[in-house]
Image (tube, rainbow, N blue to C red):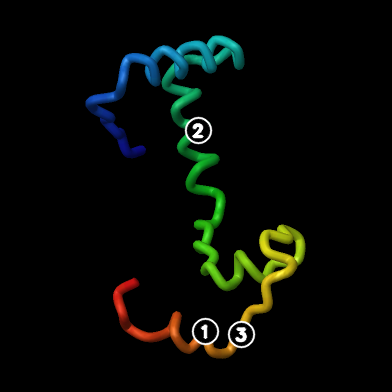
C-alpha cells in the first residue's frame, strides 16, 4: 500500500475532517481514505462551452436570444487562446 502525506492543510479543513470522521464513526485516516476514494472514482467533468451553456434548453438562460451556432462554433474552434 502507498502512503500519502498531505502538508499545509488549513486548520479549518483539518477540523472539519475530524468532525466528519467522528460523525461517521471512523478514524480521521479512514475518512480521508474514503474521501479520496470517492473523488477519484468519479469521472472528470468536461467543461461546457459557452455555446453549449447558452443553448441548453433545460437552463433557459437566454430563451429569447437567437444564436448563429454554426458561425459561433467556427469562431470558438479557432486557436485564438480565448
Which residue in the structure is indicated by mark 1?
73
Mark 1 residue element? helix
Answer above or below: position of 56 versus 67. Answer: above
Q: Residue at x 37, y 86 (%)?
A: 78
Q: Earlier in the sequence, mark 1 or mark 3?
A: 3
Mark 2 residue element? helix
Neighbor class of circle 2 (other Cα within 10 Å; few <14, some 14-19, many 20+) is few
Residue 35, numbered label: 2
Q: Residue at x 54, y 10 (%)?
A: 22
> Is there a contact, CB below 8 Å, between mark 2 and mark 3?
no
Q: Earlier in the sequence, mark 1 or mark 2?
A: 2
Q: Earlier in the sequence, mark 2 or mark 3?
A: 2
Residue 12, numbered label: none
Describe residue 61's horizontal placement relative to residue 29 as left or right. right
- Position in image of residue 75 (x %, y %): 44, 85
Q: CA distance from mark 2 to mark 3?
A: 43 Å
Q: CA distance from mark 1 to mark 3?
A: 9 Å
Which residue in the structure is indicated by mark 3?
68
Amino acid at each position: 500500500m502507498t502512503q500519502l502525506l498531505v502538508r499545509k492543510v488549513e486548520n479549518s479543513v483539518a477540523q472539519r475532517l475530524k468532525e466528519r470522521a467522528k460523525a461517521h464513526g471512523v478514524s480521521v485516516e479512514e475518512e480521508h481514505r474514503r474521501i479520496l476514494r470517492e473523488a477519484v472514482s468519479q469521472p472528470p467533468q468536461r467543461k461546457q462551452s459557452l455555446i453549449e451553456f447558452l443553448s441548453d434548453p433545460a437552463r433557459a438562460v437566454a430563451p429569447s436570444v437567437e444564436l448563429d451556432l454554426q458561425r459561433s462554433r467556427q469562431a470558438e474552434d479557432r486557436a485564438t487562446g480565448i
